[in-house]
Structures are given as structure tokens and as C-alpha cells.
Amino acid sequence: MASIHPSTSLYDIEGLVAGRDDLRPWEDEELGPVSGLDLVHLQCHIGSDTIAWARRGARVVGLDFSDEAIAVARDVSTRCGLDVEWVQANVYDAVTALGGRTFDVVYTGVGALGWLPDLVRWAEVVHTLLVPGGVLYLVELHPMWVAVIEDGSTITQRALGAAYTRWDKPNRVSYADANRPLSAVSSFERLHAISAVLTAVLNAGMSIELFHEFDVTPAPTPWLEIGEDRLYRFRPGAPPFPLTYSLRARRPQP
């Protein structure tokens, strides 16, 4: 996907280089100022959100398992004139790959957790990467978004999550552009219930400070309308419905 996404309108690399900001409107308020802080973005993909945090003055590291995605991210940050460190590694190996460094902020953006089979290990990695008093900030697709059938009219039990799901219908195109075919069409994704995320974070030793739900999503969704803010939402008159959530948790001081 990393080879396809830079040329799609969803990622709009030229707009990003020109100064477009990809963070959701609530993220600055919930995380607070990051200027001068050490921030690592886990599962950063091609680095759009990573670059946004670097522009806010954070000392940023982006980590992703895909060497192709990291190559794209490095090129884009260079074009943006930003000093961002990029590391190619599996998120479960992040502590070793980052040389045991710790950070003020661990950030995870939309669409990341669904690729992980083990949230317990993920939360333990996050805890280890944080300085005492450091913050995990997560923005993710709400399970209710996943639970809506493709025509937008029916809710299924998938909102409760599942340990492991293989889509029976092959993904032949990228979520970022329905006209771009993929060479690898099998998709293996996990549907994590919010309770699983919260429990993993708490059991890893962090305290939850904030949890919010939002009725918009950055994920392309055929049955939703896209606004000028590049976020998708239900049509006017529809009842409030959670599509995205955010979580802030802190590693306690000793």
C-alpha cells in the first residue's frame, strides 16, 4: 500500500508538503502543546501525522514495519524541510529498535490497532517507551464504524470485537483509492473491542485520563458524506453515532 498511497487524494502528499495539516481538530486540545517534547509515532505508515507533530515543534521519531513506507516518509519529511527520525521495525520490537530510549509522548493514529494481534504486548511496549509521567495518545476508528454494513443501514455484532478476523472477500483495491488495484489481496485484521484496549492500557500500568467519542471519521466511507475538513460524517438529521474515539493515558510517576 505504501507504493500506492502517496499518489492518492486521501494522503495528498503535495498538499502535505505545501503545509496541509492532517491531525483531527480535537487532537491539539486533548494532547496539549508538544513543542520541545520527545514524541514517537508507532505504526506511522508514510508519516502524514508524524510530520504534523514535527511541525508543532516536537522532536519526533516515526516507526513502521514497512521499509517502503519509511522510505516514502523520509522523502516527504525532507521535502517539508523537517528533521524527523524514521525507524523501520515491528512495533513489538520498538523498545530494542529505538535503543531503549524513552519518550514524553507515544502517539498512535487512526487505523493502526487493527493490524495488531496482541494488545497486551502493545500496551507493555508503550509503557516501556514512556518516561515516568509520559503520555500515550491514541486516536482510532470506533468499533461501531466497523460494525456498520456496507450500505450504512444495519448494525452488526462486530462492534463487540473479535480476536482475529480474516475477511472472506479479498481486498483488491486500496482503501485510499478504489481505482488502484493491490498486488496482495488477502487482508488479515483484528477487531478490538474498546474494552480490550482500555484493559490492556490499565493492566500495563498506565492511568486513563481521557476517553472521547466522535461522530466523524477520516476513513473513506461510501455511506457517509465528506466535509470541507476532509472528515466523513452521517448526513444531516441522522442520530449521533460514534465513528472515532480518542484515549489519553499516563505512565505514573514513581
Image (tube, rainbow, N blue to C red):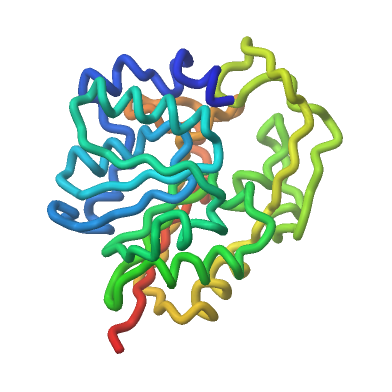
Q: Position of residue 221 (x, y in %)?
A: 57, 29
Residue 32, percent from left and from top: 20, 58
Q: Residue 108: x percent and y percent?
A: 43, 52
Q: Which residue is farthest bottom?
A: 254
Across and down, in percent, residue 4 comes to: 55, 17
Q: Is residue 192 above or below residue 121?
A: above
Question: Residue 70's quadrant in the figure?
Answer: top left
Residue 229 placement, left or right of 190: left
Question: Does 172 sit above or below residue 41?
Answer: above
Give whichever of 37, 220 is nearer the camera: 37
Q: Quadrant of residue 250?
A: bottom left
Q: Residue at x 53, y 53 (%)?
A: 91
Residue sitting farthest toward the top: 179
Residue drawn at x 52%, y 71% as measured from the top left: 124
**Would residue 240 be visible to someone looking at this image?**
no
**Quarter-of-image position of residue 85:** top left
Q: Nearer the viewer, residue 71 or 252?
A: 71
Residue 35 visible, this angle: yes
Q: Quadrant of the N terminus?
A: top right
Q: Residue at x 83, y 30 (%)?
A: 169
